[in-house]
Image (spheres, rainbow, N blue to C red):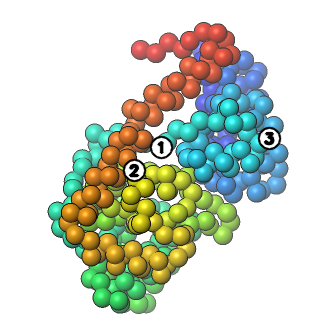
């Protein structure tokens, strides 16, 4: 069985599969997700490998305008680049408008440098020292988990910060339903690793959570512009403290406005059905361009 289109996920795999797709005479689509467009090109040989790959590639998809700029800087022809967002089936994420003021914050993500869980922990500690009465629940696992738990223990923050570890998706959804706001203080890791567009922000906004995050990678493109006052510069813990204090004083009407704008943004730009249609259109375009025929879909 011959494929109509070869689709490689991640730039590394695109480099490896490009010669194969050429031998098969099939169009190649390569999707980039984050580290493969940020830190990987800094390693020996990969930037040159990408430059060679572009000529063998019919289309490149990225997650954001920020990633598109990175691909252009690496020499990808602009006409080959398409933005296709990571998305979710929104039928699985019921909108729950805020019904109380913010008390319980939630972080969901791997415990890695680019996710910056310790920034969230330190910001929560300082916000409460300044008079807030907030609790932070942290869900996830990874290389920094021991550091997070040690800090919580050393500072005696067990009542304010609850570390849950890794949990299945149904339990994560339960944490989101119980939370009043979401926090993800992403930043560039020491090795250059960066986010793409964290899907957890799609899920949180779909469910009605105001999101406190950073001007990092594609994150600002995920948040409605009217909600950008809840974004801070990456790595700025004091600004994060201010946002925690700010969100804790917002009225129910203000919180509901933030939540409604977030849900509309996700419905418009990050629904699974919409992004699948966009990807299908790309497949059709490269197949027609290579063979003059169309792909048959049911």
* Residue pointed to by mark 1: 86
Depth order, front residue of 224/96? 224
Crowding around mark 1 (Cα neighbors within 10 Å: few <14, some 14 to 19, many 20+) is many
Q: Label 1 vs label 2: CA separation?
A: 9 Å
Residue 269 image position (x, y, % from top left): 42, 41
Instruction: Work out whether mark 3 precedes mark 2 in sequence or the reverse, and give the earlier one.
Output: 3
Instruction: Work out whether mark 1 precedes mark 2 in sequence or the reverse, and give the earlier one.
Output: 1
* Quarter the C terminus occupies: top left
Asked which quadrant contains residue 187, the reply is bottom right
Residue 190 at least partly seen: yes
- Disc assigned to residue 188: none
Q: Does residue 149 lie above or below 261 as drawn? A: below
Left or right of residue 56: residue 30: left
Label 2 near label 1: C-beta < 8 Å? yes
Label 2 near label 3: C-beta < 8 Å? no
Tell me the SS state at disc 1: loop
Left or right of residue 38: residue 297: left
Q: Label 3 vs label 2: CA separation?
A: 32 Å
Identify the residue at horizontal 68%, vertical 16% (top origin).
290
Tell me the SS state at disc 3: helix
Identify the residue at horizontal 46%, vertical 15% (top origin).
297
Depth order, front residue of 275/3? 275
Asked which quadrant contains residue 90, the reply is top left
- The single residue placed furthest to the top in the displayed view is 293
Residue 128 image position (x, y, % from top left): 33, 86
* Residue pointed to by mark 2: 202
Identify the residue at horizontal 81%, vertical 37% (top origin).
52
Residue 5 image position (x, y, % from top left): 61, 22
Instruction: Work out whether mark 1 precedes mark 3 in sequence or the reverse, and give the earlier one.
Output: 3
Tell me the SS state at disc 2: helix
Identify the residue at horizontal 50%, vertical 12% (top origin).
296
């Amino acid at each position: 069985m011959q494929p109509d289109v070869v689709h490689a996920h991640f730039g590394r795999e695109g480099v490896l599969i490009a010669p194969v797709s050429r031998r098969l005479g099939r169009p190649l689509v390569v999707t980039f997700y984050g580290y493969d467009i940020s830190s990987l090109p800094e390693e020996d040989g990969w930037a040159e490998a990408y430059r060679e790959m572009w000529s063998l590639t019919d289309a490149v998809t990225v997650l954001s305008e920020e990633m598109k700029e990175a691909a252009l800087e690496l020499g990808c022809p602009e006409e080959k680049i398409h933005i296709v967002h990571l998305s979710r089936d929104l039928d699985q994420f019921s909108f729950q408008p805020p019904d109380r003021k913010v008390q319980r914050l939630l972080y969901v993500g791997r415990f890695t440098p680019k996710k910056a869980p310790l920034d969230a922990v330190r910001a929560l500690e300082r916000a409460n020292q300044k008079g807030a009465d907030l609790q932070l629940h942290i869900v996830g696992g990874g290389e920094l988990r021991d550091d997070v738990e040690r800090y919580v223990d050393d500072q005696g923050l067990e009542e304010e910060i609850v570390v849950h570890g890794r949990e299945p998706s149904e339990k994560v959804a339960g944490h989101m339903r119980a939370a009043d706001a979401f926090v993800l203080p992403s930043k560039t890791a020491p090795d250059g690793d960066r986010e793409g567009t964290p899907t957890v922000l799609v899920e949180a906004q779909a469910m009605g959570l105001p999101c406190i995050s950073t001007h990092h990678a594609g994150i600002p493109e995920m948040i409605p512009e009217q909600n950008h006052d809840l974004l801070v510069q990456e790595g700025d813990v004091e600004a994060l403290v201010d946002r925690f204090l700010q969100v804790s004083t917002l009225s129910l009407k203000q919180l509901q406005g933030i939540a409604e704008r977030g849900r509309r943004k996700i419905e418009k730009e990050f629904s699974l059905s919409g992004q699948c249609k966009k990807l299908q259109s790309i497949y059709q375009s490269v197949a027609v361009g290579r063979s003059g025929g169309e792909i048959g879909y049911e």
